[in-house]
Amino acid sequence: MNKLAAWAFLTAILVALPARAALFDDDEARKRIEATNQRLNQIQRTLEERMTALENQLKSQGLVELFNQLEQIKSEVARLRGQIEVLTYEQEQQQKRQRDLYVDLDTRLRRIEGGSAPAPPPGAPVPSGSLPPAAPPVASSSPATASASPPAASVAATTAEQRDYDAALDRFKAGRYPAAVTGFAAFVKTYPKSPLAPSAQNWLGNAQFAQKDYRAAINSQRQLVASYPDSAKVPEALLTIASSQFELGDSAASRRTLEDLIAKYPQSEAAARARQRLAIR
């Protein structure tokens, strides 16, 4: 019996050993799994930290770029302010020239009215040089009256010219540019030899420029230069041509016109303005 009991005890021990060994193997596996999970968690945290750092760096770079853009905008605004100041000055000078022109026109009109005396009565002596060359004799019961009629017609024509010119100019001053264009174009066509024709041609181009019809303005001012090359309005015409070319996007042609204006009319007021424009371009 003792032997049997010993064998049973040994058998039980042998059976329990593999189970205990299996238990130890399970614990080791769990420890390894936990260690692996810890490493994975640590790697994940490291990756999250790196991602956060990269995001912060990108945000910082974005702010720097935005700051640079802001500085560029400030510089552009400063440049535009300078151009606005120049344009404001030019506008003031243009208004001054217009006022001077109105005064000049009024003075010339008064001279015309003061120098055109009424027709003398029949038989009255006529000052030498006040009449055009004598026409061939014409049968008339009153030679003196016949000789006095040409000055009256001349005065009427001059008055009509001034009236038509003033009417077109009034439309321009009122901002009625289409009507001003029509009026000045009709004046130049009707009175091409009038002393006011160069001014009318110049105002025609200015009215077209005011309508932003820059090609028409160029054509009108070139017609002034071609038809009235000795007129004092030629420098202003060239300046308007340069402005129109600039508005059409042809900066090179505009610069050439300004340089040509300065070379041909260096002492003119238009040349001074041309120099100012070249200085800011």
Image (tube, rainbow, N blue to C red):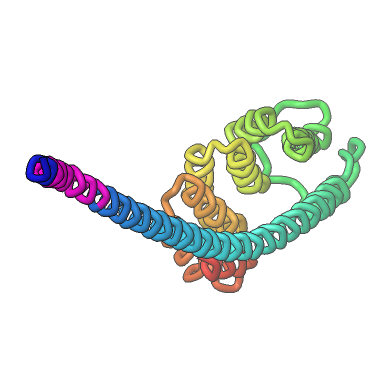
| Residue drawn at (7%, 45%) of the image | 3
Image quadrant where residue 141 sits:
top right
User: Picture coordinates of residue 179 (x, y %)?
Assistant: 69, 28
**Residue in front for this viewpoint, 157 or 74:** 74
Q: Residue at x 75, y 33 (%)?
A: 171
Image side of residue 138 versus residue 4, left or right: right
Q: Nearer the viewer, residue 56 or 21?
A: 21
How many dots with numbers? 0
In the rendered image, which quarter contains the N terminus? top left
Instruction: Indicate the position of residue 281 as horizontal and vertical percent values.
Output: 50, 65
Residue range corresponding to the magenta coloring? 7-27
Q: Is residue 272 above or below residue 130?
A: below
Residue under the image location 44 percent in, 61 percent down:
53
Viewer-proximal residue among 96 and 115? 96
- On the image, the x and y values in percent for residue 118 come to 89, 40
Is 251 left, or right, of 152 in this rendering? left
Question: Would you say residue 193 is visible in this rendering?
Answer: no
Q: Main SS type for the magenta part?
A: helix
| Magenta segment includes 249 | no
Which of these two is toward me, 95 or 82? 82
What residue is shown at x 61% (from left), y 63% (from top)? 74
Q: Above or below — where is 269 with respect to 1?
A: below
* Relative vertical location of residue 7 with respect to residue 180 in this rendering, above or below: below
Query: Residue furthest toward the bottom?
Result: 267
Q: Quadrant of residue 138?
A: top right
Is 25 one of the magenta-colored residues?
Answer: yes
Can you give x and y, in whole percent of width and height, for residue 195 in the image? 66, 48
